[in-house]
Image (cartoon, rainbow, N blue to C red):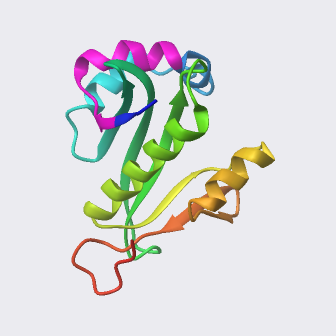
Amino acid sequence: MEYLVRPARITDIDRLVAMSDAELRVGRGASPLDAADLLRQLVYLPQASIFIAESQRHVVGGAVLALRPSVRAGGFVGTIDLLVVDPDHDADRVADALIEEVVRSASNKGCTLVEAVRPEDDAALSRWKAMGFAPAAPRIQRTVAAVGSTSRRF
């Protein structure tokens, strides 16, 4: 099965929230916005990107990339804030396609580093390592070169 990864549209948000409901409830506390409202706002903000994986025009996964400046990192840091895959689809292939697109986008936006919460599952950690991420304190991260820099790696 082939998966297409594209930027999210406002109409994709409800499906993304439905797939990631349990993950989005953790740590939400007393936020005035629910997850769907926040994600709808992020669709239009330049400091975040939401990507959707689809198969046969159905949303089967999604990822959120949040950008922040970092003096320590020497530029912007992209954080993979959410990565979710429909359990009825090939989790490895969908996640890999989403991560590749997030890393490409982060590089295009001038990020010098991409990070994500370190997975507790050894198989998931191995998948991230295979994609170039390395453990770094409580997170995993991957160094990327900004578009236009002389040290850009593919």
Q: Is residue 12 magenta?
A: yes
8 left or right of 20 in image: left
Q: Main secondary structure of the magenta part?
A: helix
Q: In this orientation, does residue 32 appear? A: no
* Residue at the limit of the structure toward the front, as seen here: 1
Residue beneath the point at 57% across and 65% down: 132
Residue 151 rendering spot, x and y as whole percentages? 35, 85
Q: Quadrant of residue 62?
A: top left
Q: How far from the left and from the top, in percent, is residue 12?
A: 31, 19
Q: Is residue 120 left or right of residue 118?
A: right
In the displayed structure, would residue 11 be above or below residue 93? above
Q: Is residue 26 above or below residue 144?
A: above
The magenta region covers 5-19
Q: 151 or 139, which lies in front?
A: 151
Is the C terminus in the top left, top right, bottom left or bottom right quadrant? bottom left
**Which residue is at 76% across, 46% downward?**
123
